[in-house]
Amino acid sequence: MVSNLFWLTDEQMVRLRPYFPKSHGKPRVDDRRVLSGIIFINRNGLRWSDAPREYGPPKTLYKVHLRRTGARTFMDVFDALAEICDLFSPEECWNYFKAAG
């Protein structure tokens, strides 16, 4: 197991819970695992295929990233995170969202 993985805290997840879709009969992916993996990938400049297996399948991370970016969910999530932690510098946030389209 990789020791330098990034994981959102319980406090951060409670704050972010309203931004995740509700389950409609299908089991949901682990939101903490997936969002932590997406943040890890972006913070380290990795390709999706290089995601550590602890975050789940790279294809899942990528698909969730695409859906949430298109729905502007990540903008809301990062705004919420900015209120409780110093995860990203303003430049990192700007570059991330500029690249996401």
Image (tube, helix red, strand yellow):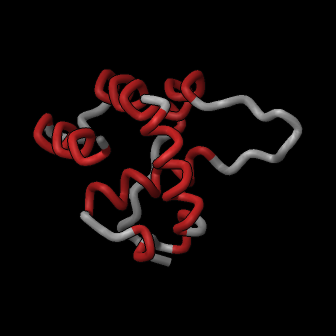
Split into 4 quadrants, where in the image is the C terminus? top left
Q: Nearer the viewer, residue 1 or 32?
A: 32
Q: Is residue 82 left or right of residue 67?
A: left
Q: Toward which corner of the image does residue 5 lie, by quadrant?
A: bottom left
| Residue 48 position in % (x across, y down) | 42, 68
Task: Classify 1 as above or below 69.
Answer: below
Task: Classify 3 as above or below 67.
Answer: below
Q: Residue at x 35, y 67 (%)?
A: 4
Q: Toward which corner of the image does residue 88 lie, by quadrant?
A: top left
How many numbered marks are there? 0
Q: Is residue 9 left or right of residue 59?
A: left
Task: Classify 2 as above or below 8.
Answer: below
Q: Residue at x 46, y 51 (%)?
A: 36
Q: Residue at x 26, y 39 (%)?
A: 97
| Residue 67 position in % (x across, y down) | 53, 42
Q: Is residue 13 left or right of residue 79?
A: right
Q: Is residue 35 left or right of residue 6?
A: right
| Residue 98 position in % (x across, y down) | 21, 41
Q: Residue at x 72, y 29 (%)?
A: 22
**Farthest right residue in view:** 25
| Residue 37 position in % (x across, y down) | 46, 57
